[in-house]
Image (spheres, grey):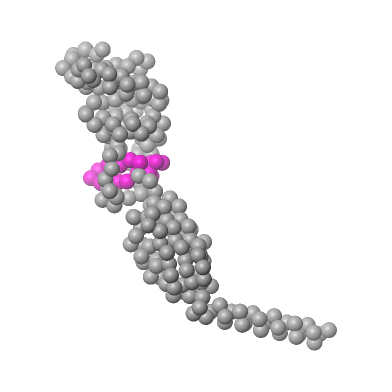
Amino acid sequence: MAIRFLIFSGIIYLFYILSQNFLNLDYFNITKINISENSKMLQPELTNLTEILYNKNIKKLDLQEIKRILEKDVRVKTAEVDMNKLGEININIEDKGLSYYAVIGKNIYLVDENGIIFGYLNEQRIENLPFIVAGTEEEIKEITKILNSILDKNTRDSISQIYILDDKEIVIILEDGVKFKIDKKINKQKYSIAVQLYLKMSKEKKIDYIDLRFDDYIIKYIGDEKNE
């Protein structure tokens, strides 16, 4: 019985040694890495990663760990890393979507839909998006939350910039310079009505601002001393 056990143990050990040596063969080295073209911002980093991974033995690579590290990058929305076939790895990166620009001091940043900064203005093609003027990153998140609650595609395109004036007033400046004065209680319905009112009334006279902070919509025309 003891002899059988020793023989069986010896076979298992021999199989383990052979399998280990077998997996270390160059046949199991990475010879091709496919990088998706979805990511524009991470191209330099992905090029470096390709150089690091090339010719590495697949046994020594943790693909899930590579995925985890890639997804920690603030510019990345999702990352997928898998083996297509022996010796070939696929890396698919999706960049975060650009929703707003943010201005803090002299810097202009890229901001995602959650108000998180993930890059600088010169890292992507310039788009027609609102500029959030803020003093801190927390203020950017606060303004983003308000914008997400009131804007749709059409109303978003008309906004030039937005900033918090004080605790009671937030100012939205449209592309033609007209101001919408709102507060943190603003809702999408009220804002949509204000946009329609603006489109109609601006045909008659040039508007300075529309104040949405009260039950009634207060319109101030340029040159008028009184509100209507």
Q: Position of residue 71 (x, y in %)?
A: 45, 55
Does the magenta segment cover residue 100?
A: yes
Decide which of 57, 120 is in the foreground and name it. Answer: 57
Q: Residue at x 32, y 46 (%)?
A: 110
- The magenta stretch spans residue 132: no
Work out whether residue 103 or residue 190 is closer to the camera in this orientation and state it. Answer: 190
Residue 211 lies, in percent from the top left, at 30, 20
The residue lying furthest to the left in this view is 223
Q: Residue furthest front?
A: 85
Q: Residue at x 80, y 84 (%)?
A: 4
Assign the N terminus to one quadrant of the image: bottom right
Question: Can you tell which quarter of the image residue 197 is in?
Answer: top left
| Image quadrant occupied by the C terminus | top left
- Residue 60 visible to an observer of this rendering: no
73 vs 175, left or right, is right
Could you say where residue 161 lies in the image, as x and y percent from the top left?
27, 34
* Residue 21 x, y percent position in the rendering: 57, 82
Instruction: Please report the residue visible at 16 percent of the width from the left and 17 percent of the height from the top.
Output: 223
User: In the rendered structure, which segment of residues is drawn in magenta?
Assistant: 99-116
Residue at 45 percent across and 52 percent down: it is 78
Question: Can the viewer see residue 127?
Answer: yes
- In the rendered image, the vertical position of residue 181 relative to residue 81, given as above or below: above
| Quadrant of residue 208 within the rendered picture | top left
> Count the marks: how many?
0
Q: Is residue 6 or residue 77 the one in the foreground?
A: 77
- Quadrant in the rendering for residue 50: bottom left
Name the residue at the bottom extreme. Answer: 3
Does 153 sit above or below residue 24?
A: above
